[in-house]
Amino acid sequence: MERTRLAPLVGIVGSVVVLGLLLVPYGVVRTSPGTAVATYYGTGAVNPLFAGMLALVTAIVLAAGREERTDPVLAAGVGLSFGLFVVGLATLWAVTVPEEVVVGIDGPRVLEYHRWAVAGVAATVPVASGWWARTLGLL
């Protein structure tokens, strides 16, 4: 039973880290963080906060499936499909944000890699959900 509980836990942690990473710019931008971060998040093809919303829902579904409050098979499938959307939205945003917007933000230089970190960490969600589906014998 423990093998089937680790994979959704990894997915839950990945989803929560995505949410945390999306909050980081609000804390590190020095000059008018609300406006600067709104510009940063609004200039790409999609707003990454949609990926954050899906990550939150995915964390809830994976937690419910892990605790068997919902069917684990259903939770693994929802986690996999929502996780793919989270990765797709985060990657699409990361690729389409203009470099001058990222460089123009008054914050630490590490913020230049923020969008890639969000997209990279988002990949843990569908990977963990796929791992869970495989452990349950679905794949």
Image: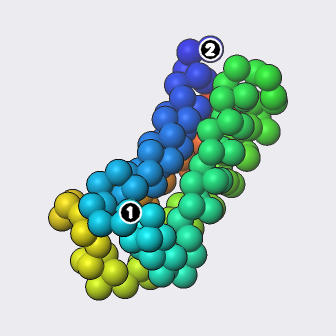
Q: In the picture, residue 28 is in which quadrant? A: bottom left
Q: Which residue is drawn at 39% across and 71% down?
A: 36
Label 2 sits on a secondary structure element that is: loop
Q: Which amino acid does label 1 sit on?
A: Pro
Give the CA distance from mark 1 to mark 2: 45 Å
- Quadrant for the C terminus, please: top right
* Mark 1 closeness class: few <14, some 14–19, many ≥20 residues within 10 Å: some
Position of residue 85 relative to residue 101, above or below, is above
Q: Which residue is drawn at 44% across and 71% down?
A: 35
Q: In the picture, residue 109 is in which quadrant? A: bottom left
Discs 1/2, front: 1
Q: Which residue lies furthest to the front in this view?
A: 32
Give how far across and how far down residue 103 sits, in percent.
Answer: 24, 77
Give how far across and how far down residue 54 sits, in percent.
Answer: 65, 53
Mark toward the start of the polypeptide (1 vs 2): 2
Q: Residue at x 55, y 35 (%)?
A: 12
* Mark 2 closeness class: few <14, some 14–19, many ≥20 residues within 10 Å: few
> How has the structure been colored for display?
rainbow
Q: Residue at x 38, y 63 (%)?
A: 33
Position of residue 5 relative to residue 94, above or below, is above
According to the picture, the residue beneath numbered tag 2 turns out to be: 1
Give how far across and how far down residue 32 sits, in percent.
Answer: 36, 66
Position of residue 108 relative to residue 36, above or below, is above
Give how far across and how far down residue 31 sits, in percent.
Answer: 30, 66
Label 1 sits on a secondary structure element that is: helix
Q: Which amino acid does label 2 sit on?
A: Met
Question: Can residue 94 be seen?
Answer: no
Position of residue 108 relative to residue 8, above or below, is below
Which one is in front, 31 or 38?
31
Mark seen at residue 33: 1
